[in-house]
């Protein structure tokens, strides 16, 4: 299994290109199941999760091709993937394929909406809490689907198609909103989704669905109204920039010090997190195509944060921010309100010398003068990258095991950091 080795101490200076968002690319790829025409997606990141979803789509009989690089494109431009779900031969998503990744469960919505049936294994994904799918199933039942659980699979049927529905989510769910949105596009009549997730990835999916012919209003607000249509067509769409990757590198610069421009990204995708970063004493400036992050000489101030649905502080940046706070002046309280078990990085950060006390949904991080390199291992994607951030300033060598978690969500992580001066390398095998 690959490992990543970092020698801490080097500041970061230069340019980091931000990839397309994993959490937008995945539902966009799934949306291709809603039409028999071709959906062309640009700026798709090269990630393990994308390959895993392509395997699942191939299993259904979806044709796909990855376009060659066009003139003017660089390795950082992202890949263009064309998906055509013309003749679907199977509507079952098996356990072996679905168990590695949460988003793959969402195929249930377009399969049901277009073919009237789906058999999908209960999902996997990052080990950050129990992560039930009750709200997704509640939404599908409201559309008129019959839902049964059989041998670890959700079996959903709607032989006469779906009908529009009033869906009130009792809590904000990104996956629930994606599923309801996709199902609603082909349901007969009007659907109203209340307490919808406002995450930019939901808006990106809605924008693409609208280009495919869907009638959607209100995406990006907490009430989305969808007028069902008989069929959707193909289109071309570029995946929006990855706000979590953007925030991760911004925090890495805040931690290591230096001056880095994050290219091909947009500050409004993570304004709350950037404001928090500003409060830590890091300079954050908007540039024409991205964000410039700078911290030279001054210390890191502790700041309290609470994770919240968008536009609040994202749970997917909580671990990275905690890594930053391990070196801050003073104590920071970090409250996790989205997932009940998203503190798996605490014990690994402690191996590097961090002082963190857990109390219910809060971590109290007392900044220390220095961290010391050590072998560490993480159990999920964002936790793994928080260890990279800590490793950037830890004295000596930090080796991060189980790099496959990082490969799920960070494209060319070592190359992007090494180009800015980090001493980081992948040890293969
Ligand atoms: C692939 C992808 O986009 N993953 C993101 C997505 O995950 P995901 O879509 O799984 O997260 P949700 O927004 O659905 O989860 C939010 C909360 O709702 C709960 N819940 C959810 C569904 C349900 O049926 N019942 C229920 O109780 C969850 O346990 C959690 O406590 O949004 C999360 C919250 O921003 C992010 O951390 C993940 O990176
Ligand atoms: C939790 C994440 O992914 P998933 O929902 O696929 O587990 C994530 O992207 O941080």
Image (cartoon, rainbow, N blue to C red):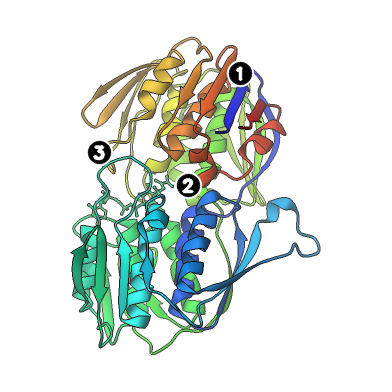
Residue identified by numbered label 3? 340
The answer to whether the residues at label 1 and label 2 have Cβ atoms under 8 Å apart is no
Q: Is residue 43 above or below residue 187?
A: above
Kindly indicate the quadrant of the structure image that contains residue 139: bottom left
Q: Secondary structure at mark 1?
A: loop
**Location of residue 31 by image quarter:** bottom left
Q: Position of residue 276 (x, y in %)?
A: 44, 35
Question: Gap between marks 1 and 3, in whole Å?
Answer: 31 Å
Dot 2: within a 10 Å radius of its alpha carbon, few (fewer than 14), some, or many (20 or more) residues? many
Residue 337 image position (x, y, % from top left): 26, 40
In percent of width and height, residue 363 lies at 30, 25
Vertical arrangement, residue 315 with respect to residue 295, above or below: below
Using the image, determine if residue 29 lies above or below residue 251. Answer: below
Observer able to see residue 281: no
Outermost residue on the top side: it is: 369
Residue furthest right in the image: 71
Q: Looking at this view, is 55 or 45 the one in front?
A: 55
Q: Nearer the viewer, residue 130 or 196?
A: 130
Is the CB of mark 3 within 8 Å of ligand 1?
yes
Answer with left or right where residue 70 lies relative to residue 266.
right
Question: Residue at 41% across / 37% down in the picture?
Answer: 380
Q: Secondary structure at mark 2?
A: helix
How crowded is the residue under tag 3: few (<14 C-alpha within 10 Å), some, or many (20+)?
few
Q: Nearer the viewer, residue 413 or 322?
A: 413
Image disc number at residue 270 = 2
| Circle on res. 168 | none
**Mark 2 Cβ and ligand 1 under 8 Å apart:** no
Q: Nearer the viewer, mark 2 or mark 3?
A: 3
Residue drawn at x 53%, y 56% is 50
- Residue under label 1, please give it: 8
């Amino acid at each position: 299994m690959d490992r990543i080795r970092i020698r801490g101490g080097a500041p970061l200076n230069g340019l980091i290109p931000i990839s397309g968002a994993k959490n937008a690319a995945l539902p966009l790829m799934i949306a291709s199941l809603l039409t028999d025409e071709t959906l062309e997606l640009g700026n798709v990141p090269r990630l393990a999760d994308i390959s895993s979803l392509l395997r699942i789509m191939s299993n259904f009989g979806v044709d796909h091709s990855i376009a060659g690089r066009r003139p003017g494109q660089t390795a950082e431009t992202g890949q263009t993937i064309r998906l055509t779900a013309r003749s679907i031969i199977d509507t079952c998503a098996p356990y072996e394929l679905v168990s590695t990744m949460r988003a793959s469960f969402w195929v249930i919505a377009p399969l049901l909406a277009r073919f009237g049936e789906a058999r999908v294994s209960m999902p996997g994904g990052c080990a950050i809490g129990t992560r039930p799918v009750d709200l997704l199933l509640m939404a599908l039942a409201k559309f008129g689907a019959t839902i049964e659980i059989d041998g670890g699979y959700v079996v959903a049927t709607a032989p006469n198609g779906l009908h529009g529905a009033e869906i009130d989510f009792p809590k904000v769910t990104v996956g629930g909103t994606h599923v309801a949105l996709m199902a609603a596009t082909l349901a007969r009549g009007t659907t109203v989704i209340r307490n919808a997730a406002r995450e930019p990835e939901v808006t990106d999916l809605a924008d693409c669905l609208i280009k495919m012919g869907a009638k959607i209003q209100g995406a990006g607000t907490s009430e989305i109204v969808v007028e069902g249509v008989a069929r959707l067509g193909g289109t071309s769409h570029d995946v929006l920039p990855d706000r979590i990757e953007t925030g991760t590198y911004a925090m890495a610069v805040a931690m290591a010090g230096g001056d880095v421009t994050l290219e091909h990204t947009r500050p409004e995708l993570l304004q709350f997190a950037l404001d928090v970063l500003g409060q830590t004493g890091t300079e954050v400036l908007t540039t024409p195509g991205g964000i410039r992050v700078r911290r030279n000489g001054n210390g890191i101030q502790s700041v309290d944060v609470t994770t919240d649905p968008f536009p609040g502080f994202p749970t997917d940046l909580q671990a990275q921010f905690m890594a930053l706070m391990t070196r801050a002046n003073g104590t920071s309280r970090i409250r996790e309100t989205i997932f009940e078990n998203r503190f798996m990085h605490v014990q690994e950060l402690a191996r590097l010398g961090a002082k963190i006390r857990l109390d219910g949904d809060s971590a109290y991080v007392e900044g220390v003068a220095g961290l010391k390199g050590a072998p560490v291992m993480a159990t999920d994607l964002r936790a793994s990258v928080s260890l990279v951030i800590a490793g950037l300033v830890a004295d000596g060598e930090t080796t991060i095991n189980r790099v496959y978690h990082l490969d799920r969500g960070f494209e060319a992580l070592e190359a992007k950091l090494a180009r800015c001066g980090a001493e980081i390398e992948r040890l293969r095998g």
